[in-house]
């Protein structure tokens, strides 16, 4: 057995590795793959033994997968349960594949693993690259291609009808029960391939799409969970035997983190067939590059006549040159697409700005109605929809309120971009755009059928909360309406990230609608503490009660530690609001109760069968931008009914 040796890393080698990681990252972000099929051969071309290249590549990849999975989960694109289940079986495949690699090395030395890895690359890249090139040619000719099945194919339908007692697992993303006996071989094969060339997604993603029936967008996102699980385990397995060169992993990771962001941006600016052409070309070039190394490995192992040193040097040099050309070709194509896209985007933005009419400072309807208080105005709503069951409630209630208030509705969906989309290709991005546009069109049709003026917005951006706040300012929304995810686990302790950020940063009020909530105008609960923020909430609640013809319970909560003076102040605050609402013709009651504020308010809402709680927000500073940091946050997490958080600007 050969003695295990890591390559020497000097300043020049470190720079080359960083550049390889940078280009590999660009390729990863651009073509929608982890990029390992470029990085592993590149390390081997620098003299890194195959087993060390694979192990170090896995070590560099799994932290990126974790970050990507977390970020894409915020957009509801990840089936965590499926990712973990498939990841467990993938881990078994990694363990088996790692054992096979070690056995080959023990029996045949470093040349044996180099031959094994190179042969697998030639076969896998030949198959995948050939299919991708075929699709690129067909798409350029205008022929239909099979991107994501519009309907379940026969295999996926059969898998979902298969019922093996004691093995069935329900997956919410597809609303179906799948036997883990079906998932096991898919996960095992994914892990086996990953432990060999550090790219398991070539099996995992197509398997989830065409065998399990996941949408392509969700399959690519869920693969990040699998990649994290098997990458972490695989790195540990290899590290225990001393095969992970952490220096390689960290240098390549540093380069790829920069490159992937450029590639991810570039992929949004080019046509689908161009992305596939670049992907296929790089794959086939890498295949040819690896092919030129195989005769040398075969001769070194005695399987064929050993090559003369000069002959092997020439073949290795050709392989290195082809790989260098593949990396250079990918970098040039990506940067060209990026620069061209930026230029076209700037021109389009300037043209749109020149053509856009000026937005009036005050809505015409408001001027006609003589409304002076922006707090009481309900004329323009912005509702965020991602097509999920959670945002469906927000859309439903937005349209219902708009019908009662005569409001205009703006509906937005986010097309997320950024480094977290490393597993996306242009075809999947286009599929996502189609899904988003279809959802927006459906909502607009529903709104117009109800006589509601509706505009839709498909927004490209990284952070959904920032885009919501920016669009709300742009359209001068009086109210942002958002859904809220379930209240199990950590959701009971902390409000969803995007919702909390919007409430903290928005300049208008925010209505949060849980999935099962219905605002029917039965009863409103207004929480007040006598502050100016609570007064703003009272004005808004009074206006809304008039629109809905709803009864209102005004409550102020004191705690046992409060003295008589604080209770008197609470009673005065309630009386002031009650008097105002009665003068407006609203049926209202006033209450001062003692206890934990959030518990008292949510308890009163349940007792009165209220469908809306109205509360004020105490500003946008400090931690409140992130967690709201007040009674409002706890109310939002504890109640099943909708909550309106009134902002004062």
Image (tube, grey):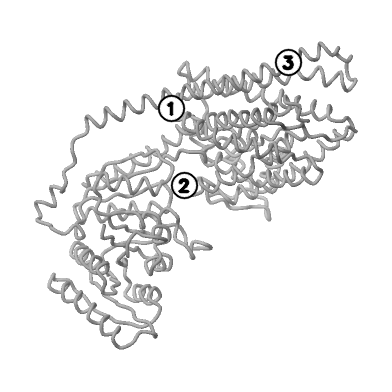
Q: Which residue lies at the image location 19% right of the left edge and 76% below the top edge?
A: 578
Viewer-nearest of discs 1 and 3: 3
Task: Tell me if label 2 and label 3 are in contact, CB under 8 Å.
Answer: no
Q: Looking at the image, tell me whether mark 1 or mark 3 is earlier in sequence order.
A: 1
Residue 532 image offset from top left, x and y in percent: 24, 68
| Residue 269 numbered mark, or none | 1
Q: Which residue lies at the image location 60% right of the left edge and 38% below the top edge?
A: 254
Q: Nearer the viewer, residue 15 or 325?
A: 15
Q: Determine the secondary structure under disc 3.
A: helix
Q: Number of marks in the image?
A: 3
Viewer-nearest of discs 2 and 3: 3
Distance from label 1 to label 3 (Cα)? 35 Å
Which residue is labeled 3 in the image? 317
Residue 30 image offset from top left, x and y in percent: 52, 29
**In this image, 584 relative to 315: left or right?**
left
Which residue is labeled 2 in the image? 75
Quarter residue 423 falls in: top right
**In this image, 146 relative to 524: left or right?**
right
Q: Determine the secondary structure under disc 1.
A: helix
Distance from label 2 to label 1 (Cα)? 22 Å
Q: Looking at the image, tell me whether mark 2 or mark 3 is earlier in sequence order.
A: 2
In the figure, 457 relative to 402: above or below? above
């Amino acid at each position: 057995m050969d003695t295990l040796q890591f390559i020497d890393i000097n300043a020049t080698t470190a720079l080359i590795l960083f550049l390889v990681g940078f280009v590999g990252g660009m390729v990863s972000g651009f073509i929608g793959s982890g990029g390992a099929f470029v990085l592993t051969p590149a390390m081997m071309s620098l003299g890194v033994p195959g087993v060390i290249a694979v192990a170090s590549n896995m070590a560099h990849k799994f932290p990126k997968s974790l970050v990507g999975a977390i970020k894409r989960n915020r957009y509801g694109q990840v089936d965590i349960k499926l990712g973990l289940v498939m990841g467990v079986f993938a881990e078994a495949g990694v363990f088996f594949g790692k054992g096979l690699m070690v056995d080959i090395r023990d029996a045949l030395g470093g040349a044996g693993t180099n031959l094994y890895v190179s042969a697998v690359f030639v076969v896998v890249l030949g198959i995948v690259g050939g299919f991708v090139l075929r699709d690129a040619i067909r798409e350029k000719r205008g022929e239909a291609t099979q991107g994501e099945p519009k309907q379940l194919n026969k295999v996926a339908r059969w898998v979902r009808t298969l019922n093996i007692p004691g093995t069935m697992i329900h997956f919410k993303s597809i609303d179906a029960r799948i036997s883990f006996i079906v998932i096991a071989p898919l996960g095992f094969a994914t892990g086996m391939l990953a432990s060999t060339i550090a790219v398991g997604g070539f099996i995992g993603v197509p398997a989830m799409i065409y065998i399990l029936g996941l949408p392509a967008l969700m399959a690519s996102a869920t693969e990040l969970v699998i990649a994290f699980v098997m990458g972490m385990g695989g790195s540990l397995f290899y590290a225990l035997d001393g095969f992970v060169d952490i220096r390689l992993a960290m240098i390549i990771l540093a380069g790829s983190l920069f490159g992937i962001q450029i590639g991810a941006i570039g992929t949004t600016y080019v046509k689908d067939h161009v992305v596939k052409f670049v992907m296929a070309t790089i794959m086939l070039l890498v295949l040819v590059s690896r092919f030129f190394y195989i005769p040398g490995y075969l001769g070194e192992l005695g399987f064929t006549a050993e090559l003369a040193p000069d002959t092997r040097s020439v073949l290795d040099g050709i392989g290195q040159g082809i790989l260098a050309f593949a990396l250079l070709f990918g970098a040039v194509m990506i940067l060209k697409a990026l620069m061209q896209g930026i230029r076209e985007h700037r021109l389009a933005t300037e043209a749109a700005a020149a053509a856009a009419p000026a937005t009036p400072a005050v809505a015409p309807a408001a001027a006609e109605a003589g409304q002076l208080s922006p707090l009481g105005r309900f004329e323009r709503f912005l509702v965020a929809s991602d097509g999920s069951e959670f945002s469906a409630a927000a859309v439903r209630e937005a349209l219902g309120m708009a019908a009662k208030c005569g409001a205009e509705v703006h509906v937005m969906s986010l097309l997320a971009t950024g480094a977290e989309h490393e597993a996306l290709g242009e075809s999947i991005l286009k599929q996502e755009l189609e899904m988003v546009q279809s959802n927006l069109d459906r909502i607009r049709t529903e709104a117009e059928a109800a006589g509601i003026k509706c505009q839709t917005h498909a927004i490209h951006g990284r952070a959904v909360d920032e885009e919501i706040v920016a669009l709300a300012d742009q359209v001068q929304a009086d109210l942002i309406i958002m859904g809220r995810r379930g209240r199990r686990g950590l959701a009971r302790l902390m409000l969803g990230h995007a919702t909390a950020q919007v409430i903290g940063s928005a300049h208008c009020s925010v209505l949060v609608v849980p999935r099962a909530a219905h605002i029917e105008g039965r009863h409103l609960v207004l929480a007040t503490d006598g502050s100016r923020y609570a007064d703003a909430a009272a004005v808004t609640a009074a206006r809304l009660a008039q629109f809905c013809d709803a009864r209102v319970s005004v409550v102020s909560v004191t705690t046992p530690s409060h003295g008589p003076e604080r209770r008197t102040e609470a009673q005065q605050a309630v009386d002031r609001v009650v008097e105002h609402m009665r003068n407006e013709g609203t049926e209202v009651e006033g209450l001062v109760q003692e206890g934990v504020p959030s518990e008292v308010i949510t308890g009163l809402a349940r007792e009165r069968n209220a469908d809306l709680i109205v509360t004020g927000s105490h500003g946008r500073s400090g931690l409140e931008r992130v967690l709201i940091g007040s009674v409002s946050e706890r109310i939002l997490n504890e109640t099943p009914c909708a909550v309106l958080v009134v902002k004062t600007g």
